[in-house]
Image (cartoon, rainbow, N blue to C red):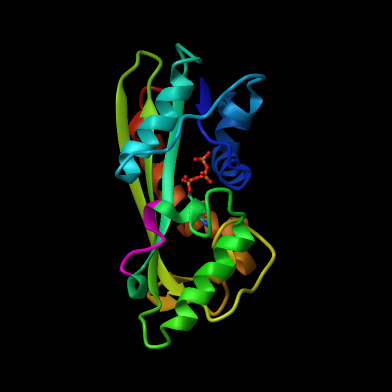
Amino acid sequence: MELWVATGNAGKLTEIKNLLHSRVTEKGWVVRSQRDLAVFTPRPENGKTFLENAQIKTRAVAAVQRGVWVIGEDSGLEVEGLGGLPGLHSARYAGPKASDPENVAKLLKMMALKPMASRRARFVCTLVAISPEGTESHFTGELQGEIAKAQKGGGGFGYDPVFLPLIDGAVSTQTLAELGSGAKNRISHRAAALRAFLASIEGSAP
Ligand code: ITT
């Protein structure tokens, strides 16, 4: 089976490839991404929901890679004390071309401005899959947790250095960036959505 991942985000792609590793080695799946295309212009993510944005990016790759599976996802961080922000705007929280460290710095600043605000937060992910025949389906995942007071850890990407996940009902003392990719892939919003997709096709996959 050939599966294309509609993302330009290297951190997301690494996680998805790790989750698919056993299918590649044991079942011969071939996993590629839009980063492998010589020419590809991403479409503006101007949807009003995570689902609409996931559809925009997945359909863009499916339009140039026909007859294969294509998956893409839109994800983000919703912080209770910030009324759900950065939410849909997670990738561009500190500005249109903001880097991960700039977004993290803005989040810490916004939380510092509201010392009494709830630090409860969740990562959400909506994954869209388009089959070789063009049938579309979607899957979701979420990860509950809290925003740390300072960033810690060098792993992961995005807001991982400030996210303390809820593990077995308790808030972790380590951020996702400290826990590492193996632990993150057992609990993450992205892993949950991807596992739901895999469960849905596992019966029909060659
Ligand atoms: P693609 O659209 O090309 O996939 P992107 O980085 O623009 O890449 P999104 O539009 O889905 O992806 O933005 C999601 C942002 O939310 C991402 O850039 C991170 O800042 C944040 N985010 C999502 N999942 C995350 C995770 O597992 N860990 C840390 N931050 C995450």
Q: In this view, does 102 lie to the left or right of 59?
A: right
Could you say which quadrant of the image residue 33 lies in? top right
Front-lying residue, 125 or 198: 125
Q: Where is residue 178 in the image (x, y as percent from the top left)?
A: 63, 69
**Residue closer to the observer: 184 or 23:** 184
Q: Give the range drawn in magenta.
A: 83-88
Q: Quadrant of residue 100?
A: bottom right
Residue at x 37% of width, y 22% of height: 204
- The residue lying at 52 percent from left, 76 percent from top is 109
Question: Residue 53 in the image: x percent, y percent?
Answer: 37, 38
Residue lying furthest right in this view?
A: 154
Task: Tell me if residue 87 is in the magenta stretch.
Answer: yes
Q: Residue furthest bottom?
A: 116
Q: In this view, does 52 lie above or below 68?
A: below
Where residue 114 sits, quadrant-wise, is bottom left
Looking at the picture, how far across and down is residue 126, in whole percent?
36, 44
